[in-house]
Image (spheres, rainbow, N blue to C red):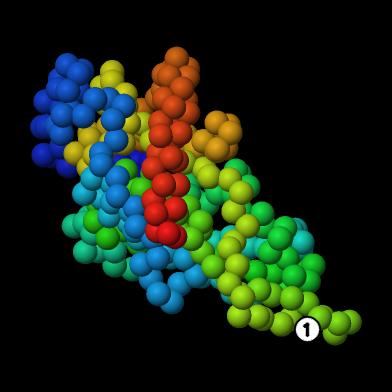
Amino acid sequence: MSATPQLSPVAKMERKTLIDLIEGGKRLDDRSSSDYRPIKIRTGIIEKANGSSFVELGKTKVMAGVKVELGEPFEDTPDQGVLTVNVELVPLASPTFEPGPPNENAIELARIVDRGLRESEAINLGELCLIPGKKVLVIFIDIYVLDYDGNLIDSSAMASLAALLTSKIPKYTVKGEEEKIEVKDEPMPLPVSNYPIAVTAAKIGRSIVLDPSYEEEQVMDARLTITVDKDNKICAAQKGGLGTFPLIEVQSIIDKAISKSSELRSKLLEAVKAGQS
């Protein structure tokens, strides 16, 4: 995911073989250029979290947990709650992940997920304000990558949205002139009103493929992630890698993202509904 990826010697040797295969209309796992790997979504897997989910995208495994706490608003948005996204690239998930503070890949991944949720206004942060300028609800989304086999962006975005959609928080009320905050044991859902879906395309040679696997990410020239909301509006985009996309390729990826996001959103909402039944 690094913006300045360095290919390993093995990847460099395999690059031509992969490019020839993809330009011949084939991929290592027999998918078409627009196919995603099998997706499995489970919710409610962390008992003590307000909401949680586990997403498998092929062999990539990502877990997301939501925790909601009382806190203070930002000075420039005194009447809105706070959203914070963190990513942990757990070392057991890949030999390339190292322990320690978040590196540039983890920070970039968190920002892409955050931007999609924020710019689509997936959460009505205004409803999370209790006392303007003083007390709001703070939503923490923690993403843990448990097995890395490519396309962490799309899997992390789906895991975060599924966790938010299944989150339950206590009912907070403000009483009297002293503005005392009371917490009632009446679970209520988070105010989620939009469902952004991230779709990532990788450019390999002269070809574009969706949902790049680990092997494809090692040899890709560039990637472009388009996040689409429930009304098929683009709410975020992120380009990575040193390669470039001509305008015609960008338009093609946007068209594919709009089409594919609808399909992925339906799967996610079905999984969330099944988990709540």
For residue 176, which quarter of the picture?
bottom right
Give percent across and percent down for residue 36: 29, 35
Q: Amino acid at mark 1?
A: Lys
- The quarter of the image holding the N terminus is top left
| Total numbered badges shown on the rendered structure | 1
Image point (36%, 31%), residue name: 201
**Looking at this view, is 214 or 189 the one in front?**
189
**Looking at this view, is 168 or 101 the one in front?**
168
Image point (40%, 31%), residue name: 260
Give percent across and percent down for residue 8: 17, 42
Crowding near the residue tagged with mark 1, few <14, some 14–19, many ≥20 C-alpha atoms within 10 Å: few
For residue 209, which quarter of the picture?
top left
Whether residue 218 sits left or right of residue 16 in the image: it is: right
Is the residue 34 above or below the residue 74 in the image?
above
Give percent across and percent down for residue 84: 55, 61
**Looking at this view, is 167 or 62 the one in front?**
167
Whether residue 54 sits left or right of residue 58 in the image: it is: right
Give percent across and percent down for residue 25: 20, 18
**Looking at this view, is 128 or 203 the one in front?**
128
- The quarter of the image holding the C terminus is bottom left
| Residue furthest out toward the front | 277
Image point (36%, 48%), residue name: 155
Q: Secondary structure at mark 1?
A: strand
Is the residue 245 above or below the residue 240 in the image?
above
> Residue beneath label 1, please?
180
Q: Is residue 127 visible?
A: yes
